[in-house]
Image: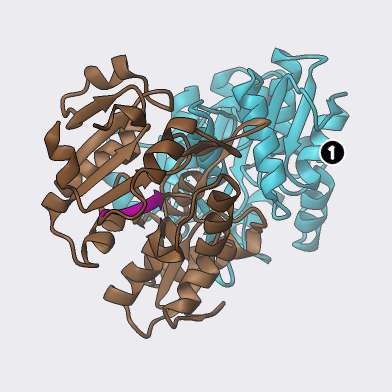
Chain colours: A brown, B cyan
Amino acid sequence: MNKLKSYKAICLDMDGTVYRGNEVIPEASVFINSFQGKDIDIYYVTNNSSMTAERFQAKLLRMGIHASTDQIMTSSIAAATYCKQHFEGAKVMMIGEEGLEQALRSEGFVITDENPDVVVVGIDRNITYEKLSNAALSIRNGAHFIATNGDKAFPTERGLVPGNGSFVKLLETATDREATIVGKPEPYMLEFIRQRGYSKEDMVMIGDNYDTDIQAGIRFGIDTIHVSGGVTDRATVLKKDMQPTYLFDSLTDWK
Amino acid sequence: MNKLKSYKAICLDMDGTVYRGNEVIPEASVFINSFQGKDIDIYYVTNNSSMTAERFQAKLLRMGIHASTDQIMTSSIAAATYCKQHFEGAKVMMIGEEGLEQALRSEGFVITDENPDVVVVGIDRNITYEKLSNAALSIRNGAHFIATNGDKAFPTERGLVPGNGSFVKLLETATDREATIVGKPEPYMLEFIRQRGYSKEDMVMIGDNYDTDIQAGIRFGIDTIHVSGGVTDRATVLKKDMQPTYLFDSLTDWK
């Protein structure tokens, strides 16, 4: 596995790969810290659109992991980047939380409640019927329909609650239009990392979830590493048509 | 068309057939009033779950149409009847408005926010993420999943806004479970009218929407009359595999 040492950008899923809830995964911590002082960049790649890069940075720091905000790639940051590249100067209507709002504003977008050119939808736990109606009416009036991520549900201490993908489905049903989804398994987040100066051969995507993390890497055309102990177990991965480049029991398998 | 005179229960869609918004359709008014004093019962059959029978009664009265609350069959009343027949004594969690709440209470159901046996979902323009999460968690925990109606969107003065069917799709997506939908085109409302003492031969379903009104009648196995001027135009109806029994330009075609 000498090839492992030739990567220049390691793209790591967070929840289920670096930590579980608020608990760091020890092997991940050892793995990440082993790159300190080396010429290899680590990126943290998450579909979670709710938090800002600063909040993820602080969360990682509480687990003893030092990261700059530039190393954090959320589906909100990616959605804002996508809008910047496709609809610069557009008026944007947003359904979302702090992470999406900050990402859109930092790309210079004006956020509006009326006559938007683009509607961007991320998880919003203060959702109202009015927000959903405004989004549906705007999409029917021709606004572009962008979603941070398509996760149908996400785990909480109470169980699986509706994820952004369920709200996207609501709006797709109400409007007969299909959203452009930016998060994993779509490859946009990896492409925006690549644009910082890597080639695809430089990059590897590592994660526990075959359907999002590994699929994103495969669709983007880079090497992938599946790590056991999270959403998808090893036996399930082995049944898939498209295999990850490597299957790890834990990140300490990296040699 | 002498057969028309042999029906004992005329089931009329309301919006698009009896009125448009707050304006009565004159031919419908003439049609309905022609049955006064005759031994033919009229039922008003609507997927709108938001209002109580009393509110529909008052709305019709403002248009000069006298109806008793027994003649009003809403998807909320039908959902409550369905629950009474299948889950009597169950604890019910509700997403919905006044029409659904009153219908469930009048069938004797206790409405709860915790550990329900049944989750009933109707349109709720005060929807919150908390309500949707509670419903999703309950459905995942095994509660029966009932929806008043599956309309994806409905018209307002601003345009088409999300209907209950879009919220049902959200919960189906979040839970991987399929709802039992009670409203048209499902035949439950017609069956609950039949149970008041009619045979199918006694009944006719009249409406402007092929996909809900006419389909409900066809699936239930009763005669149907499509009336032009509403959601589905005559040319579109004529292309369907399953034709309504009669095609009317207006309700004054009833002879």
**B208 with respect to B194 (left or right):** left
Task: Give residue A75's position: percent from left, percent from top.
Answer: 41, 56
Whether residue B132 can be seen here: yes
Q: Kindly identify the amino acid type of the residue bearing the numbered disc 1.
A: Gln
Q: Secondary structure at mark 1?
A: helix
Q: Badge 1 is on which residue?
A: B102
Chain at tag 1: B
Q: Residue furthest bottom?
A: A89
**Horizontal side, residue B196 vs residue A106: left or right:** right
Please say whether residue A169 is one of the residues in the magenta stretch. no
Residue A25 placement (x, y as % from top left) = 49, 33
Give the residue furthest to the front: A37
Q: Could you tell me what secondary structure mostly forms the magenta stretch?
A: strand
Percent position (x, y) of residue B221? 47, 22
Give B50 or B146, whichever is nearer the viewer.
Answer: B146
Q: Which residue is painted at 75% across and 62% down in the image?
A: B63
- Asked if residue A134 is positioned above or below residue A155 in the image, the reply reads below
Q: Quadrant of residue A248?
A: top left
In the depicted structure, whether residue B173 falls above or below residue A179: above
Magenta region, residue range: A40-45
Instruction: Kindly tell me whether residue B240 is visible in this rendering.
Output: no
Q: Nearer the viewer, residue A31 or A87?
A: A31
Rendered location of residue A36, percent (x, y): 37, 51
Please tell me which residue is depicted at 39% across the width and 60% down the height of the picture. Answer: A71
- Total marks shown come to 1
Neighbour tally class for label 1: few under 14, some 14-19, many 20 plus, Cα within 10 Å: some
Residue at figure coordinates x 59%, y 71% from the top left: B157
**Which is more toward the observer, B102 or A221?**
A221
